[in-house]
Amino acid sequence: MPVPALEEPRYVRTRPAAVSVTGVDVGAWLRANVAPLRSVDPDDDDFSDLEPLREIVGDARVVAIGESTHRIHEFYQVRHRLTRFLVSRLGFSAFVMESGFPEGLAVDGWVVGGPGERDALLRGGITYHMGRCAEMRDHLRWMRSHDASRRGGTSAPTSARSGIRP
């Protein structure tokens, strides 16, 4: 049996459908509900653009902040800025990230004032190579500094495991 000739591929530029399978006009919903970020700079303490999150978070004690891929500069900056907002404005007191459990204990120990070099910790204490990003270095520095300011600069007892205290 002869193999039929393949047609030349045709590339057609299409627009994504405005209506999802649920019947909701996604574009209209986004226009009505979007709250643009004024900044992704973690050192920017003007959190006015993040205030809409206060209502969304409500009385939740856990907020998941995800990203579509690791080691993307802007994702780390946004996560760091959101962490600062959640801690300083909404009273959150723990930070959990995707990493191995033993590695997480090492990071927690350093954040609460334990010994060690941050760069060595970043290389071996955070899995998936996420510690290789400068933004993660800055995030951990802020967490350690924030934690120290909350306990008067003293070393925390080893039983203290939160990493960030309000």
Image: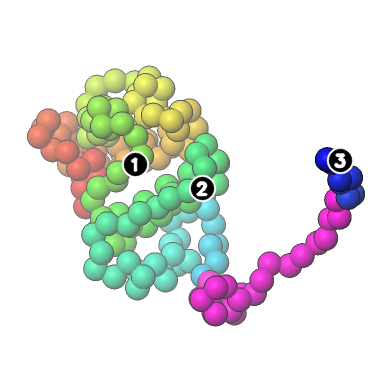
Look at 57% across and 73% down and name the residue there.
20
* Mark 2 vs mark 1, CA separation in Å: 14 Å
**Considering depth in this image, is 77 or 18 the residue closer to the camera?**
18
Say few, some or many: other residues with alpha carbon within 10 Å of mark 1 (under 14 / 14 to 19 / 20 or more). few
In the picture of the structure, the residue carrying the numbered disc 3 is 2
Viewer-nearest of labels 3 and 1?
Answer: 3
In the picture of the structure, the residue carrying the numbered disc 1 is 97
Check disc 2 and give the amino acid type.
Ser
User: Percent position (x, y) of residue 82?
Assistant: 41, 54
27 on left or right of 2: left
Name which of mark 2 and mark 1 comes first in the sequence: 2
Tell me the SS state at disc 3. Answer: loop
Magenta part of the chain: 9-34
Check disc 3 and give the amino acid type.
Pro
* Mark 3 vs mark 2, CA separation in Å: 45 Å
Look at 12% across and 30% down and name the residue there.
158
Look at 31% across and 31% down and name the residue there.
100
In the picture of the structure, the residue carrying the numbered disc 2 is 68
